[in-house]
């Protein structure tokens, strides 16, 4: 039986409340993208999402039940994170430890079997990093978040600017001043400029803020601008 208008309003209200709470919890967890999570972090994230759905599916259950359960899991996760910072043994228990798959050019089959990584998966990860031959790899390490760190033999690595004697410009972090026609005044202040400077710079190019999709400026004055 479908809920009436009042029931639909209640579902929408609960969804909005729990969605906001879920976003807040994940922000407090400070977690990364799903593909970069430790196993314990991924489990906690999925559990919190499931807890948030319970009061939406069961309208007889008070919404604070879901909020309380989410808060409890958040507190437990924060505690585990703190303990893992203090204890290497518990860190390895909850997060595991990196596993070497290729050691000085030698493929470690036992470690491949233990981590259940087959050769097709290994070579696929290597191709993603621009490596076509396994014998080009000196070290390959499976990190605790599932990512593969690869170090080619020196003769298969591209030369650096220092090795070739080429002088390169130092990189500067660009500040986004306008995003989709909207000014970001905090970044403008960090650069030491004001709105008048920005208006003059845009007028010299025959533009207004609304004409700009993206505007970035470095402290050195390098401007990158995308128009609509």
Image: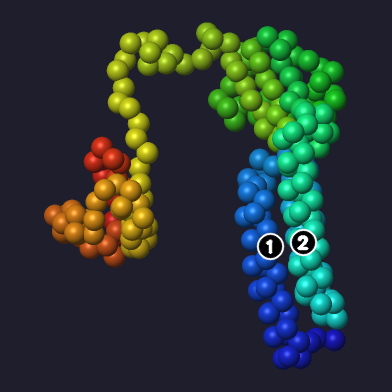
Q: Residue at x 73, y 83 (%)?
A: 10
Q: Quadrant of residue 178?
A: bottom left
Q: Residue at x 78, y 73 (%)?
A: 64
Q: What is the quadrant of the N terminus in the image?
A: bottom right
On the image, the x and y values in percent for residue 9 come to: 69, 85
On the image, the x and y values in percent for residue 152 come to: 59, 15
Q: Is residue 85 above or below residue 49?
A: above
Residue, disc 1: 22
Residue reaching furthest bottom?
5
In this rendering, position of residue 181 left or right of residue 197: right
Q: Quadrant of residue 11?
A: bottom right
Given residues 130 and 77, the one toward you in this image is 77
In this rendering, position of residue 214 left or right of residue 44: left
| Observer able to see residue 119 | no
Q: Quadrant of residue 109?
A: top right
In the image, which is nearer the foreground, mark 1 or mark 2?
2
Check disc 1 and report its element: helix, strand or loop.
helix
Q: Is residue 76 above or below residue 109?
A: below
Q: Residue at x 66, y 16 (%)?
A: 139
Q: Is residue 132 above or below residue 20?
A: above
- If you read the primary sequence from the N terminus, does the residue marked by circle 1 or circle 2 appear first? 1
- Mark 1 is surrounded, within 10 Å at the Cα level, by few (under 14), some (14 to 19) or many (20 or more) other residues, namely many
In this rendering, position of residue 154 left or right of residue 167: right
Q: Are marks 1 and 2 in contact (CB under 8 Å)?
A: yes
Residue, disc 2: 70
Numbered marks: total? 2
Check disc 2 and report its element: helix, strand or loop.
helix
| Observer able to see residue 10 | yes
On the image, the x and y values in percent for residue 147 come to: 67, 32
Q: What is the quadrant of the C terminus in the image?
A: bottom left
Label 1 and label 2: CA atoms lie apart by 8 Å
In this rendering, position of residue 28 left or right of residue 107: left
């Amino acid at each position: 039986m479908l809920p009436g208008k009042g029931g639909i309003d209640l579902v929408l209200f609960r969804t909005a409340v729990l969605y906001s709470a879920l976003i807040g919890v994940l922000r407090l967890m400070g977690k990364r993208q799903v593909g970069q999570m430790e196993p314990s972090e991924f489990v906690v994230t999925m559990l919190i999402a499931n807890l948030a759905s319970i009061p939406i599916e069961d309208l007889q259950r008070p919404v604070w039940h879901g909020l309380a359960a989410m808060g409890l899991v958040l507190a437990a996760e924060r505690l585990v994170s703190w303990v893992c910072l203090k204890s290497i043994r518990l860190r390895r228990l909850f997060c595991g430890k990196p596993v070497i798959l290729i050691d000085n050019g030698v493929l470690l089959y036992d470690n491949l079997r233990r981590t259940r990584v087959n050769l097709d998966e290994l070579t696929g990860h290597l191709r993603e990093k621009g490596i076509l031959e396994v014998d080009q790899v000196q070290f390959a390490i499976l990190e605790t978040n599932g990512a593969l760190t690869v170090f080619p033999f020196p003769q298969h690595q591209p030369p650096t600017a220092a090795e070739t004697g080429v002088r390169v410009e130092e990189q500067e972090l660009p500040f986004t001043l306008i995003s989709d026609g909207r000014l970001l005044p905090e970044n403008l202040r960090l650069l030491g400029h004001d709105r008048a400077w920005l208006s003059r710079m845009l007028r010299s190019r025959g533009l207004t803020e609304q004409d700009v999709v993206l505007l970035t400026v470095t402290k050195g004055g390098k401007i990158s601008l995308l128009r609509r």
